[in-house]
Amino acid sequence: MHPLAFLVPSQSAKSRPNAPISLQYITQDRDQRPKELTTTLRFFLQLLRASLHALPQCATRVADLLGLVSNGWDTAQSVAEAERRLSIESMTDARIVSDERLAIECTVLLPKVRTKFRVAFELLAAVGEGMEISSTTEARAWVVYGEKYNEDVMTKFVTDRISDVADGWSDAVREMREKLVAKGAKGMRK
């Protein structure tokens, strides 16, 4: 990135071309072995890179650019922490669905009722107004095999317990597991 690319063009120049911007992940402690970049962090890194390349640099303040990167990485860390907590509760898999969509799916086994269900948290993230990462989360729960629990009720249960972008994911899954185990077998199999 060249600092001159961020100067407002003069009256004679209509615009100035964007200079290349490189954004890389570097671990904080260089003495330790580098930490692996998770799928979730890689998703946010790619999102931030694409957003930086699309910015009209001559109309963007450097402070705004740095704020975008800082706030975006804070969001990435928050989602990564929610994923980590979720992985303590169940088997978890994250995958990048598209440039702006990340899916984090967990699988929960209920041996006492011979049932397996999944909960997917789909995160939609983009650069919104004020050069900040705006994101929303949609949750969906379904039975893979076993008891025929009402999947709409399961989805509503999880959705009602999550707040913000990534808050409450693991708590919602844990509470649902406990509720389904307490409910027991209904006698119907999927």
Image (spheres, rainbow, N blue to C red):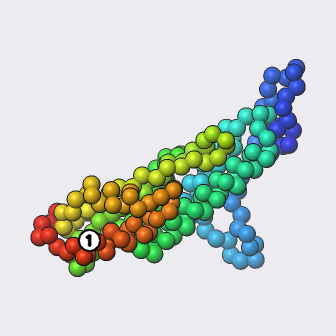
Q: Residue at x 76, y 42 (%)?
A: 20
Q: Residue at x 55, y 67 (%)?
A: 81
Of residues 14 and 35, the one drawn nearer to the viewer in this rendering: 14
Of residues 40 and 168, the one drawn nearer to the viewer in this rendering: 168
Give above or below for 174 relative to 50. Answer: below
Q: In the image, residue 37 lies at what x, y percent? A: 60, 64
Residue 169 visible from this viewpoint: yes
Q: Is residue 135 left or right of residue 65?
A: left
Give above or below for 46 relative to 183. Answer: above
Q: Is residue 111 left or right of residue 188?
A: right
Residue under numbered circle 1: 180
Element under label 1?
A: helix
Task: Give the quarter of the image for residue 180.
Answer: bottom left
The quadrant in which the N terminus is found is top right
Task: Give the quarter of the image for residue 79.
Answer: bottom right
Q: Residue at x 60, y 63 (%)?
A: 77
Of residues 16 and 65, the one drawn nearer to the viewer in this rendering: 65
Residue 39 visible from this viewpoint: no
Q: Residue at x 87, y 38 (%)?
A: 4
Mark 1 residue type: Leu
Mark 1 burial class by Cα count in 10 Å: few <14, some 14-19, many 20+: some
